[in-house]
Amino acid sequence: MDQDDQRDEAETVTCGNSKCKSKIVPGDCQDGDETKKKNKKKSQKTTRRRQLMSFSELPDYMKDNEFILNYYRADWSIRDAFFSVFSFHNESLNVWTHLLGFILFVALTVANIMHHDKFFPVDAKSPGNVTRWPFFVFLGGSMFCLLSSSICHLFCCHSKDLNLVLLRIDYTGISVMIITSFFPAMYYIFLCTPRWYVIYLTGITSMGIFTIITLFTPSLSSPKYRGFRALLFAVMGLFGIVPGVHALVVNWGNPQRNATLVYELAMAVFYLVGTGFYVGRVPERFKPGWFDRVGHSHQIFHVFVLLGALSHYAAALLFLDWRDHVSC
Ligand SMILES: [Zn+2]
């Protein structure tokens, strides 16, 4: 008999003496005891629910990566899942890598808004007066992706239904980030020949919508289709090669050509290497259980996504600077 049970018995005995009977009717007393027992069971249940579990104990909807063996949350309440942002489980760094990235992009957006009041200038093509909206579309897309990813990783342990909804939002966020990344590059490069930025932006937006609709099929969210999902995102990213080569030919004489090219290539490398970790589940596949909380593939993938977004941000600043000096 544990201490709690002994305490319970003691309370029952106390309830049965004359002192108890003289103050409250027996029915009330029993109700009080039952309430206490119920509360005790409830608190035990809550404690149990907040315990981290192993891969083998997980419900099927949470079984995503068999190389991560421990520190899982499953079937937690929204409240418990929310406060788990301050505890150390196997999703902690997945949440924080993109949450800090989101905060960084909010700060960059605020800094840019404070320095510019030219969202929709009257003469958007004149030097020093180029419109900023495509740049802010990219910043908005990045913030949406990073925040939806953090929310997905934090609350995906709540229930099967919410898990599926959040995964869809996460995939939508990745697609939106890829689509919006094209906006500053295409708009500023082809500012003087608008038909080209219309063609390329329509192309990437259509591909993004196709990807989102495809990934809304529940079965495609399963671990089995991890490679297929990565392929869809990679194809969207690789679509950038077409306007990239076109831009290089058209703007060969641009003095900032090499710098922007380096940033954009860095972005492509970061995204592709990150996707490689995501699909390959490296390094945890070589030492299952070693990287449960720190260093597993999804965390590395998140860091590379953030580095890719920052490279593209640097390239976008160069495009803006160029268009502030060189008009059509
Ligand atoms: Zn993620």
Image (spheres, helix red, strand yellow):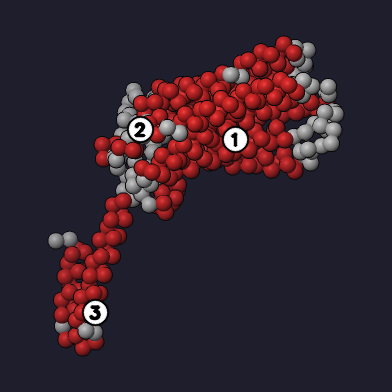
Q: Is residue 175 visible?
A: yes
Residue 95 rendering spot, x and y as whole percentages:
47, 40
**Which residue is located at x 66 percent, y 35 percent?**
137
Label 1 element class: helix
Q: Is residue 281 left or right of residue 32?
A: right
**What's the residue type where badge 2 is placed?**
Asp
Determine whether label 2 and label 3 are within 8 Å by CB. Answer: no
**Identity of the amino acid at label 1?**
Ser
Counting from the top left corner in percent of width and height, residue 328 is at 83, 22
Q: Could you say which quadrant of the image residue 73 lies in?
A: top left
Q: Residues within 10 Å of mark 3 (few under 14, many from 20)?
A: few
Q: Residue at x 77, y 16 (%)?
A: 255
Q: Which mark is residue 64?
A: 2
Residue type, numbered disc 3: Asp
Q: CA distance from mark 2 to mark 3?
A: 50 Å
Q: Nearer the viewer, residue 186 or 112?
A: 186
In terms of sequence position, does the residue under pointer 1 or pointer 3 come before the other? 3
* Horizontal and vertical percent position of residue 139: 64, 36
Residue at figure coordinates x 54%, y 41% from the top left: 147
Mark 2 Cα shell of 10 Å, populated few (<14), some (14-19), many (≥20): some
What residue is shown with label 1? 142
Q: Is disc 3 placed on a helix, strand or loop?
A: helix
Query: Which of the numbered marks, if any, corresponds to residue 28?
Result: 3
Q: Are marks 2 and 1 in contact (CB under 8 Å)?
A: no
Residue 187 falls in which quadrant of the image? top right
Q: Nearer the viewer, residue 105 or 86?
A: 105
In the image, residue 276 sits, relative to residue 97, either above or below, namely above
Image spot of residue 186 (x, y percent): 69, 24
For this orientation, the residue located farthest to the bottom is: 22
How far apart are the alpha carbons under marks 1 and 3? 59 Å
Q: Residue drawn at (70%, 33%), measured in percent from left and top? A: 135
Point out which mark residue 11 bears. Answer: none
